[in-house]
Amino acid sequence: MKFNIKKQSFYKALSSVGRAASTHSPLPILSGIKFELRDDALTLIASDSNISIKEVLYANDENKLNVYEEGEVVLESRYILEAVRKLDSDFIDFEIIDGALTRISGNKAEYNINGSKAELYPTIDFTKPTKEFKMPGFKLSEVIQQTAFVCSTSEDRPIFTGVNFKADGNTMNCVATDSYRLAKKSIDLPTPMDFNICIPAVNLYEVSKTISDNKDVHIAVSDKLVQFYVDSTLIQSRLIDGLFPDVNRLIPAEYGFELTVNSHDMISAIDRSSFLKSDGYWTVKLEASNEGVLISSKSQEIGSSEEILKPIDYIGGNLKISFSGRYMIEALKSFKTDTVKILFVGEMQAFILKNPEDDSIVQLVLPVRTFD
Amino acid sequence: MKFNIKKQSFYKALSSVGRAASTHSPLPILSGIKFELRDDALTLIASDSNISIKEVLYANDENKLNVYEEGEVVLESRYILEAVRKLDSDFIDFEIIDGALTRISGNKAEYNINGSKAELYPTIDFTKPTKEFKMPGFKLSEVIQQTAFVCSTSEDRPIFTGVNFKADGNTMNCVATDSYRLAKKSIDLPTPMDFNICIPAVNLYEVSKTISDNKDVHIAVSDKLVQFYVDSTLIQSRLIDGLFPDVNRLIPAEYGFELTVNSHDMISAIDRSSFLKSDGYWTVKLEASNEGVLISSKSQEIGSSEEILKPIDYIGGNLKISFSGRYMIEALKSFKTDTVKILFVGEMQAFILKNPEDDSIVQLVLPVRTFD
């Protein structure tokens, strides 16, 4: 195995694939990247059985890949990445010199890295499922950014660690919840589809790192896995087993109170009370009336805070409701818009946040019971 | 106790003092900052018994301190710092409203923070020792930057966790060692002094954060403590007990081999082999002869690296010596100069690094024995 390639293209592909290499897998070889060199292309593969990434570099004018001798090898991800990054050279020479011992060189420096034989690497099935559709990169980015942050990080209920993608005809609903809050985003599909899958949030974050805003992402779905095709990169994620609960009935349809705020003002006001948090958590009380809106917070141990918020508009009578400061800030931030509408049913009822100009996204937050 | 002050000046003083507040002291009140308000000045004090910082803000045009009512209180450092930082206001109102309950407000927001009575705070003696001298800020910065990194971080031999400052007449020698390497910096004193103290490296780092390059630092020394006066800030550090070993005899006076290198080239060459490190440590072999200089490194597990270094000059015969890559990089970096001279006695002897244009600083590194 022997080739020469532009350092920049090689390093970019290595970093992209390297994200899937496992650092603490029971199978040590999974901490490596598999290199497959054929006549016209270099294929890089890494996987931790949860997520697998494949990158195919066809020889072209950008990467200047020159293949001298086909072959295969597996190299430890962090060593090959650091070696290539540190080489002070525009081009990298890569050559197996003995068994799996691989020489990487450029300019004055030369590294020999102990690799493993490619036969030892488990076969990863990258067969494309038949259900397939495409989406603009920026749209998929938005879906992930507006839903995945809601997912639970605890493995107590695995189904809540993923985002539910449910397609029914030309609509796809993407829903995430950790049972204290919920995000729901609706997407129009170009062709009718039919699937109901739950994708781990951590894998969606990896996908969003790879997406280019102005390019289409091709998504292929089976009942076992999902594939995201972005340029020369294929990201394959396992799905979370189990039935995602039907959450539509949780989103209230009628409201008694309607508060319209400048999102930045409200985020700042809540953030200012965050010095009262303990373990990252603090409860904020909102008191709204026709006279104004008061934001306050209290901690037995530390002290208290209060401030007056000037809303854009408020319709409704007297309302007093408490919620997690962090959940409210994250919900407000997800809209990336100046104006947000908060719709309340009543004092101990779940409330929702909406963008007045975009009905596709709803954030729901459960209130917190306080005793004062 | 009641005052009003410019947020920026207040926050700056709080952050400076807050660095000494202890987060895990057995005495909980030491996690606080003590506020003492008198007619014309606000004094802030924090201490963790290892380091104490005092900041005196006299009312002036910059801080716009307005004193309405004298008084004292202790507030938890992290809460008051975060509260003041987050207040969206140019001026801060500070007032004890009940016992030790303190109100901090500005613009629309208002915080009440539970404090502690000032009487509960231990008395810290800031009496100035009689031995005193001054030094330009940039000079003291340089001393710290060129020596403290060598100190040991292990408490096995406490004396090695500090820098030895030894004044004898008009010369002060500042020495640090962890028994594997050593740094020695000589300073001319404006007046003859006589002391021999060892200051904890961690405290010196705090001092260097406070120093302004173009202002003098006044240093007062006793056999118990050292004080650094920087503008309105006083930093007081305990000393490390015990006798610092005499290291002068360790620095060889004659050399058989003299290698002059471009410091950046040598740092890059050694850094390129750092992917071979495990636990932050890797051994680098240098082979010099009249033909050239070869830098190589080897790890049984990972692989090997080698590259040719073009020296500026080399005088001496064949030399083969191994050393810690990290120690060598840190020693080279401490000079902040393009050219560094490395002087070797022989294969298994300590060697030194010098700046050809500045004799005041010497770095010494012990070689590592290798078996190949």
Image: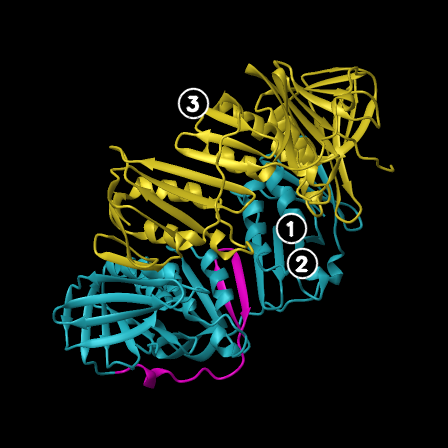
Chain colours: A yellow, B cyan
Q: Residue A314: percent from the left, percent from the top?
A: 74, 16
Q: Are marks 1 and 3 in contact (CB under 8 Å)?
A: no
Q: CA distance from mark 2 to mark 3?
A: 51 Å
Residue B96 falls left or right of residue B138:
right
Q: Residue A62: percent from the left, percent from the top?
A: 27, 34
Q: Is residue A160 above or below residue B22?
A: above
Mark 1 vs mark 3: same chain?
no
- Residue B126, by quadrant, is bottom right
**Amino acid found under the numbered disc labelled 2:** Ser
Residue interval drawn in magenta: B225-252
- Residue at image mark 1: B78
Confirm whether the magenta stretch covers residue A328.
no
Q: CA distance from mark 2 to mark 1?
A: 8 Å
**How packed is label 2: few (under 14 Cα within 10 Å), some, or many (20 or more)?**
many
Q: Helix, strand or loop at disc 1?
A: helix
The chain under label 1 reads B
- Residue at image mark 3: A214
